[in-house]
Amino acid sequence: MKDVIEHKEHHLHLENVLLSGTGGGIQKIVLVGNPNVGKSLFFNYLSGTYVDVSNFPGTTVSITKGFYKNSEVYDTPGVYGVSSFNDEEKVARDIILEADIVINVINSLHLERDLFLTLQLIDMGKKISVFLNFSDELIKRKIKIDTEKLSELLGVPVYETSAVKKIGFEKLDEAIATAKVGIQPDGLHHVLHETLNRVGSQAEALLITEGDEFTAAKHGIPCGSGDDREFIYIERRNRVNEVVSSVEREDSPKGLFFNALGKYSLNPITGIPILLVMLTVLYFFIGDFVSQRVVNFTEKTIGKKYFEYYLKSYVANYTPSEIAVTLKDEADPAKRIRIYTFKENLKKDSKKEQEFKHVSRDENAVVDFKFSNWMAKLLFGEFGIISMTITYLLFLLLPLVSAFYFAMALMEDSGYLPRLATMLDRMMNRIGLNGRAVIPILLGFGCVTMAAITTRLLGSEREKTIATAILMYVIPCSAQLAVIAVLLSGAGIAPLLIYVTVIFSTLVVISTTLNKFLPGQSTPLLIDLPIMRLPRLDNAFKKTFFRAYGFMKEASVWFFVGALAVGLLDITGMLTVFQDILAPVTTHWLKLPKAAATAFVMGVVRRDFGAAGLFGLHLMPMQITVALITITLFVPCIAAFIIMIKERGVKEGLIIWFSAWVFAFLIGGIVAQIII
Amino acid sequence: MGIKTLDTIKKGTYFTIEKLPSGIIKVQLIRLGISVGDTIFCLERLPGGTIIVQKNRQEIAIGYELARSIFVKIKIT
């Protein structure tokens, strides 16, 4: 038997019609909750009837009554509190006042909001059981609620359910049987005492004290003032906040581990070892996997062997060329290097062309094209604007930059990056930066050009200048790092220590000096620390894609411009002039062979060219040390230089660029004078 | 209880914000949920003086220099 009674205007008489008519001894179970908490699904389960389940608050303004076992079950409109602010509240209030047992349904995701009603129900002195609905959503959103603790703090039974999935309904019998009066605040009874003596019901006494005019009128006594209500409400709100903060925790499924990791990564004592582990993992991913294996394939195979080979062969069809093919596997040294000279073009000498094509298709052949036409040289030569730059951009830089952005995205999304910035903040303060500057500096080890763009996120011009200077002077980019690592590993432990010490001291001296003399103030650290969790791969991929795309879009054109500048220097013979100027400094001051000057000048084009140029020189370990120090401190590659001019202005860019020449030779020379 | 600056607050204490530094940093603080009158918890003090505070579920790192310019009052719990 079911009655659905439409709510009418006469609230005061409602309970007589509705509740008294069912006879005295029957237990009344009332479902109470905020709007959209899923109460109706509970009602359906209990009474076995279908009631309209809707997402809109207030659609259950009609009261629904059903039977469950020997009890009557009432559904109430969703309300945020029991009082008389609107029709729904009035209806709910009247049913709740008559309830024997209240089943309070809560949306677990809005504990702070929903518990306000729960505490009011407890203060009313009703027997209650609480159901935390949407518990499946909690798992999805990585929020944890300590149900036992909540039950303990409220003094009533608390159950987890997912009404939509019909999980937890089996607990309803137990909930009805064990419902009890919750823990009320110490002072409450004292406040209610007088009113309670007059009306005889704690629930009504509370409502009257809270200023409910209807209940007060029913008993013919004055209701509490607005001040009383505000006082009780604020006190209740504070209690809710306390309860929520002690039972709810937002974290990952492996909550404890990640929370602890987050905490440990903040404090330098534990944070530095964690950082070292992270850097080791990064090294294996970027330094070993991407910059060695992946780039070897993309640059050497796709770039050089296919893209450049076909492009240049095609160009050679139209212009004179001299092609050197080096066969690494050839045992006879006389046959190892073969030179094919085409006075006009490939097509004109088809026999030689066929031989060249046959030989150059050998698995390990290295093919070098030399064009005599200056235009062909400029566009497709060794530093060809088109040939070299495209290989460099697409097959070397893009994989590296993507790998770095990907690693950064993972560190960012896991919540580690902001903690790293926090841990390093005080250290960075000494050099005029705040912890956030760790982002461009870390990126600098990938690509200084990419890092120079990232200095934008720093808070002041001053910090941008300091960070840019550090990047341009002392941070070796990954292309350079790879060569440095190979050379140093062959040189022994002393050169490594000298190298690291000199570079690090230079960093400290330059940045503290800048911090001291640059005008203005650096901005303080202020960042929110998101929860630590396993990063989502799809999100990291998305970020990587957009950032790598953004970088390529912004920087690519400057790599072409840089290649053009170097190409022109090469054609006009200026490159040789530079080398000649540097030669005496190189031999006397740096105590290196004359050819090392070429390596330095090549460093202007691409930093790794500079370092790689040292390979063939047969240097002593200490000479390697000096050469690497000089090349690390030497000017950044031409693309980084142009980006720096763009970001920091012509004056600042030129000052940093020219002083890099000075620092590199000055410091390299001093070290040379001491150790060689 | 007297008014102190945030950098002197011990780990594990609740405090209320009395005065924030002026300028853009104030707006940033408010956006992160730190405004005058708010009760905030000091979660951690790192060596060197960087402070980690917690408001509701939000953790926020505040640099030493900034912490020195935030005036707070310790809350008796």
Image (spheres, rainbow, N blue to C red):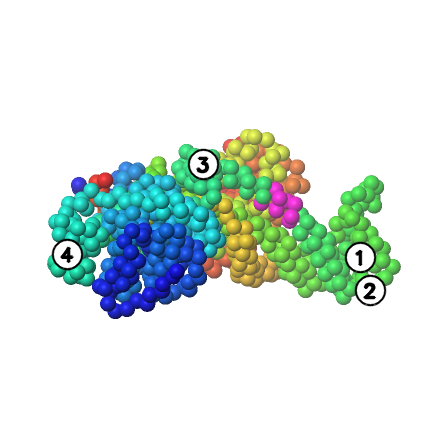
Subunit bearing disc 2: A
* Figure quadrant of residue A390: bottom right
Residue designated by label 1: A341
The residue type indicated by label 4 comes to Gly
The amino acid on which the numbered mark 2 sits, given as a three-letter code, is Lys
Q: Is residue A617 visible?
A: yes
- Left or right side of A355 for A244: left
On the image, numbered disc 3 is attached to which residue? A272
In the image, which disc is placed on residue A347? 2
As drawn, is B5 to the left or to the right of A251?
Answer: left
Q: How far apart are marks 4 and 3 (CA)?
A: 60 Å
Q: What residue type is labelled 3?
A: Ile
**Magenta segment, which residues?**
A286-295
Seen at 71% across and 51% down, the residue is: A301
Instruction: Name the mark on residue A224.
Output: 4
Instruction: Determine the CA span between mark 3 and mark 2.
Output: 63 Å
Q: Is residue A180 magenta?
A: no
How far, Cα to Cα, is label 2 from label 1? 12 Å
Q: Earlier in the sequence, mark 2 or mark 1?
A: 1
Residue A258 image offset from top left, x and y in percent: 45, 41
The alpha-carbon separation of the residues under discs 4 and 1 comes to 106 Å
Q: Quadrant of the N terminus of chain A?
A: bottom left
